Amino acid sequence: MTANNKDLNPIVCFQFTSNSIQIAASLEIIDSYIKVQNRPVSYYWLGGGTRYPSTMARGLDGPLRTVKFFPRFLKKALSSINSIELQTNSKIKKRSDFNLIRKELLKQCENFVAVQEFSTLCSEEISPGGALANSFVYETGKRTINYSKDKRLLKLLLTSYLETYFGVMNVLKERQPFRVVLYNGRFLHERATWDACKQMGVEVSLFETTRNRFHVRLNQGFHDRILNQRLMKDFWYEKERQLHTSLILDLGSKYFRDLESSRNRFYSGPSLDNEIERYFVFFSNSDDEAIGFWDSWTEPFLEQVQLVRNLQIYFRNNLGSHLYIRLHPNLSNKSKDEQARWFGLASENTSTVIGAKEKVSSYQLLKGALGVISFGSTIGLEAAYHKIPSAILADCWYDELGVADKLNSFEELTRWIDTVPKCFPSQKLIERKNGALVRGLWMELAGNSFLYSEMRELAWGSWEVTRFKGVKISRNKLRIAISVFSNKMKRRSLGLRR
């Protein structure tokens, strides 16, 4: 192979996640490219050897920082694709002479007080701010920075980002790939890889998995909320021309029916035992997924916990209705700092806090509410489906679908609370339900089916791939447990709390 022979330039995959469905998606994508034109394949499994031990790599992590052996099951699965050449690698050559760049970037961080300021980070055309912000908030649960306390974490994240960035650059220069295959593009090492590809002008096929399907985009990620919603609308219009209206409506509704069923792992049992008839519900949600993608996401006008405290004061002073504050069940998986902020909220006469682990049906709360308030929780979209007025207080995945009132200040929110019970046109609620079906249809039909992967559903919305082209790629529970334990020990040794 010569570097000038474009037809033989390889497909290169950088994989940092250990989940079987994401590994299988990368194999399906590589296989589809090989079928069009057979090329060499270079596959890098790097998740267990990065400086920052990401939880995404837990299922294949090992006790050493440098993983010496490429997973045998993965090599066997790759061999089934029958590319003209296969290279498997568990490490990349890393530059160690980036201390000056790291020092300069840390120096810039010294006066930062908010993660939004990471957007200005830059040294020698390297801009790690988006990746750094996303991982920082994931680890700490906070959007404020105290450099003296956070320096250790910032240094760890920057070091791991730069090692990956320059290591990938070395591969790109050596292999000169036809295309790179990469998962998601959000997380620290994936973002470093994508940034390196942009710098080198290399095309990237980014992929994402949703339940038992996967999506692929060329040189575009999955966190542009405006693009995502435009694609959903276009998909709806396309299906309107292909399918009967009744079928489209049923498919769009199926997503919401399944969300409300006991198959959903976030389904919470019985109804709340109370006699309050007039109430609003605030549903908390994780809002860290889009941090660092500042091109299409803006900061909310108020942080969630502070907004709830303000609402409690408002309901205390404006009798006539009650406020329920439903904490998301997934809060128990967040950092201790994040949990502490939410657990500091307390019930009052005019407001009730429902904890993350309390077995109370969110759907019964939703259906009896005068209105639903959130920062973009999925249940705000479900409110539209059930024809309940919904207010969103931040950019979110459905704010362009016409399903909710997007409010930009606390004053607008209190006016909305005052007016919603008095007058909300039924026709408007019907239109909002139809808008919700746009996303429902997308979740049911959009994307690519797994053609060569045997799958099983672990729980609602959660799937595992057991085999690819007959090759077993799922690992036994003991090996996974050992890998998870190794990852946790690595993280604990570095002061990481999850």
Image: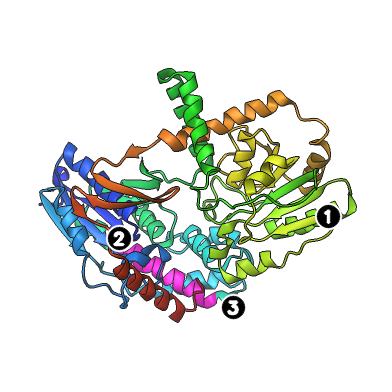
Q: CA distance from mark 3 to mark 2?
A: 32 Å
Question: Which contiguous range is marked in magenta?
Answer: 151-167
Could you tell me which secondary element the residue under label 2 belongs to?
A: helix
Above or below 256: residue 496? below
Q: Secondary structure at mark 3?
A: helix
Report the side of 443 relative to 474 (left or right).
right
Secondary structure beneath dot 1 equals loop
Q: Amino acid at mark 3?
A: Lys
Find the distance from the CA under tag 3 to the CA under tag 1: 38 Å
Q: Which label belongs to residue 169?
A: 2
> Marks 1 and 2, Cα distance to the nearest angstrom?
58 Å
Residue 162 is covered by the magenta coloring: yes
Disc sitting over residue 350 in the figure = 1
Give me the disc on residue 497.
none
Residue 194 locus on image (x, y percent): 37, 54
Residue wearing tag 3: 149
Q: Amino acid at mark 1?
A: Thr
Is there any visible trace of residue 8 in the rendered image?
A: yes
C-beta proximity under 8 Å, tags 1 and 2 = no
Name the residue type under label 2.
Met
* Nearer to me, 7 or 52: 52
Q: Is residue 383 above or below residue 281?
A: above
